[in-house]
C-alpha cells in the first residue's frame, strides 16, 4: 500500500510539473529571446571560432559520395539565373555590366565564400531586389551627371563600411527576431517568383508556355537566319523539354525509396537526379529532334568587359551609338576610375545615402535567408556566423564595385536547394 501511495504522489507531482511546463510553453510561444549583444567585435570573433575555426579543415577535406552530384546541382541551379541576370543588367546599365561581369562576380565570390565563409551552405548570387536597386542607382548617376560605375564603386565602399559597423556592434542579432512565419512567407514569395518565371510570367516573356506564342522574341532571333524555322515546333519542343526534365527529376528522386536495385545504387540515382535528367533530355533533343531549334543560354564568346567603346573616351557603346564604325576601339578597363567624378567630388559623400539602402537590402535579404537555412528543424551542426558573413559580403561587394561587377547577396532558392541536396532524409522527409 505504501508503495502505491508513493507512486501516486510521484505521479501527481510529475503531472503538476508537466502542467506547469506546458503552461510555461504556452506563455512563451512565439517569443524570441535574444542573447546579450557581443559588441566591440566580440561577435565577429565568436562567429569565426564557432564556424571556420572549428569546422574548416574537416569540411574542406570531406570528399564523399555527395560532393560531385551536389556540385553539379549547384552549378546547374546557379548558371542559368546568372546569365539571365547578366542580360538584365546589360539592359538597365547600357551594357556597362553584363553577362561576363555577372559570371565573374558569381564565380570568384562563390569560390572564396565556400572556402572562408562562416555559413558555406549558403549560395551567394544575384537577386531581383539588388537588380532593381542597381537600376535606380544607374538612373541616379545619370541625373547627377557622373559615370555609373564610378558612382557605384563609391557606394560599394560605403556599403562595406556599414557592414563592418553592423558586425562590430552585433546588429545582425536582430535578424533572429524574425519568426518562422516571416521566414516562410519570404521563402514562399521568392519561390513563387522562380516558379512563375519558369512556367509562364503573365507580365513578361519569361516562362516555358510563353514559347508557344508566335510573338515570343526567341522566334524572331532563331528564324532570322533560318527560312525553314518553325515557331510552333520550337515552342512545343521547349515545353516538352522543360516539363519532361522536371518530371524525370522527381522520378529519379522517388527511386530512393523504391524496390529497384540496391540501396547504394538508389542513393546514387537520387543524388544525380537533376544532372542525369538534364543530360537525358539534352540527348533526346539532339538525337530525336536535330533539326528543331530551341533557345539556349546566351553565353558570351570572349572573356572581356561587356562595354565595347566607340573611342578612347569610352563613354559611348559600340555598335549601338556608332553604327557607322566598323569595329570597336576597345573595351572598358576592368578597374573603375574612382576619380572620374566630372568635378563633382561631393558625390563621394552623397554616395553614403544610396549605400544605406544597399546595406538594408543586403542585411535583410541575406539575413532572412541565413535565418531560414539555420532553423533548428534543419539540424545543422555547423553553427551560424551572421556578423562575420555580413562583413564578408560587404567586402566582396566592395571589390565588385572596384571591378565594375554587380553586387551579390545570399540567394534563397539555391540555398534551399543546396541544403536539401546535402541533407540525409528518411522516407518521411
Image (cartoon, helix red, strand yellow):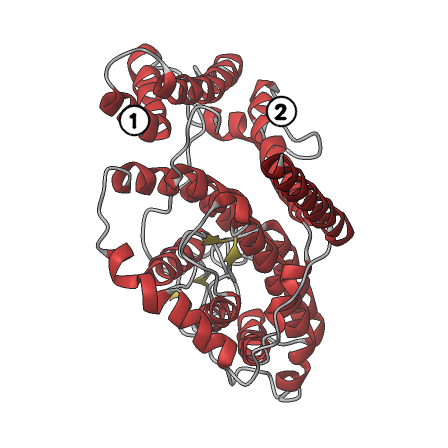
Where is residue 144, by image quadrant? Answer: bottom right
Q: Quadrant of the N terminus?
A: top right
Q: What residue is at 61 percent from the left and 64 percent from the top?
A: 363
Q: Is residue 420 above or below residue 241?
A: below
Q: Earlier in the sequence, mark 1 or mark 2?
A: 2
Observer-nearest of 299 and 45: 45
* Secondary structure found at label 2: loop
Disc 1 to disc 2, how far (Cα)? 44 Å
Where is residue 330, by image quadrant? Answer: bottom left
Residue 7, image x and y in percent?
61, 38
Residue 255, image x and y in percent?
36, 17
Q: Are marks 1 and 2 in contact (CB under 8 Å)?
A: no
Which residue is label 1 attached to? 267
Where is residue 172, by image quadrant? Answer: bottom right
Observer-nearest of 1 and 31: 1
Q: Residues within 10 Å of mark 1 (few under 14, many from 20)?
A: some
Observer-nearest of 294 and 221: 294
Which residue is label 2 attached to? 215
Q: What residue is at 60 percent from the left and 19 percent from the top?
A: 214
Mark closer to the observer (1, 2)? 1
Q: What residue is at 45 percent from the left and 45 percent from the top?
A: 83
* Secondary structure found at label 1: helix
Residue 61, image x and y in percent?
21, 55
Can residue 115 be seen here? The reply is yes
Q: Is residue 207 above or below residue 93?
A: above
Q: What residue is at 47 percent from the left and 79 percent from the top?
A: 337
Q: Residues within 10 Å of mark 2 (few under 14, many from 20)?
A: few
Residue 395 disc label: none
Can residue 327 be seen here? The reply is no
Q: Is residue 49 above or below residue 111?
A: below
Residue 146, image x and y in percent?
62, 76
How many numbered circles are shown?
A: 2
Amino acid at each position: 500500500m505504501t508503495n502505491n501511495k508513493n507512486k501516486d504522489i510521484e505521479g501527481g507531482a510529475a503531472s503538476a510539473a508537466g502542467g506547469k511546463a506546458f503552461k510555461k510553453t504556452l506563455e512563451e510561444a512565439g517569443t524570441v529571446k535574444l542573447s546579450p549583444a557581443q559588441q566591440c567585435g566580440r561577435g565577429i570573433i565568436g562567429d569565426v571560432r564557432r564556424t571556420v575555426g572549428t569546422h574548416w579543415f574537416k569540411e574542406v577535406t570531406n570528399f564523399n559520395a555527395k560532393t560531385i552530384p551536389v556540385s553539379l546541382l549547384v552549378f546547374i541551379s546557379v548558371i542559368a539565373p546568372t546569365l539571365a541576370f547578366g542580360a538584365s543588367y546589360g539592359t538597365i546599365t547600357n551594357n556597362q555590366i553584363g553577362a561576363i561581369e555577372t559570371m565573374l562576380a558569381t564565380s570568384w565570390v562563390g569560390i572564396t565564400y565556400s572556402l572562408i565563409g562562416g555559413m558555406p551552405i549558403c549560395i551567394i548570387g544575384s537577386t531581383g531586389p539588388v537588380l532593381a536597386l542597381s537600376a535606380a542607382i544607374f538612373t541616379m548617376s545619370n541625373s547627377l551627371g557622373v559615370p555609373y560605375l564610378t558612382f557605384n564603386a563609391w557606394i560599394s565602399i560605403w556599403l562595406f563600411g556599414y557592414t563592418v559597423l553592423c558586425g562590430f556592434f552585433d546588429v545582425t542579432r536582430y535578424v533572429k527576431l524574425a519568426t518562422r512565419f516571416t521566414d516562410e512567407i519570404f521563402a514562399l514569395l521568392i519561390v513563387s517568383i522562380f516558379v512563375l518565371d519558369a512556367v509562364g510570367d503573365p507580365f513578361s516573356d519569361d516562362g516555358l508556355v510563353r514559347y508557344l506564342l508566335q510573338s515570343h522574341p526567341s522566334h524572331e532571333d532563331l528564324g532570322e537566319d533560318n527560312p525553314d524555322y518553325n515557331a510552333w515546333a520550337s515552342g512545343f519542343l521547349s515545353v516538352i523539354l522543360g516539363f519532361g526534365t522536371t518530371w524525370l527529376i522527381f522520378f529519379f528522386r522517388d527511386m530512393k525509396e523504391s524496390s529497384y536495385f540496391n540501396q547504394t545504387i538508389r542513393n546514387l540515382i537520387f543524388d544525380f537526379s537533376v544532372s542525369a535528367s538534364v543530360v537525358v533530355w539534352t540527348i533526346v533533343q539532339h538525337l530525336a529532334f536535330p533539326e528543331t531549334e530551341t533557345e539556349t543560354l546566351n553565353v558570351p564568346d570572349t572573356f572581356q568587359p561587356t562595354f565595347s567603346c566607340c573611342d578612347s573616351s569610352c563613354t559611348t557603346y559600340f555598335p549601338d551609338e556608332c553604327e557607322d564604325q566598323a569595329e570597336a576601339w576597345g573595351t572598358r578597363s576592368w578597374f573603375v576610375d574612382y576619380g572620374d567624378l566630372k568635378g563633382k567630388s561631393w558625390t563621394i559623400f552623397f554616395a553614403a545615402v544610396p549605400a544605406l539602402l544597399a546595406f538594408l537590402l543586403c542585411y535583410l535579404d541575406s539575413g532572412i535567408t541565413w535565418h531560414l537555412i539555420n532553423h533548428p528543424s534543419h539540424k545543422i551542426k555547423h553553427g551560424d556566423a551572421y556578423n562575420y558573413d555580413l562583413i564578408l559580403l560587404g567586402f566582396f561587394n566592395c571589390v565588385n564595385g572596384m571591378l565594375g561587377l554587380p553586387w551579390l547577396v545570399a540567394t534563397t532558392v539555391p540555398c534551399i536547394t543546396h541544403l536539401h541536396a546535402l541533407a540525409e532524409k528518411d522516407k518521411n522527409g
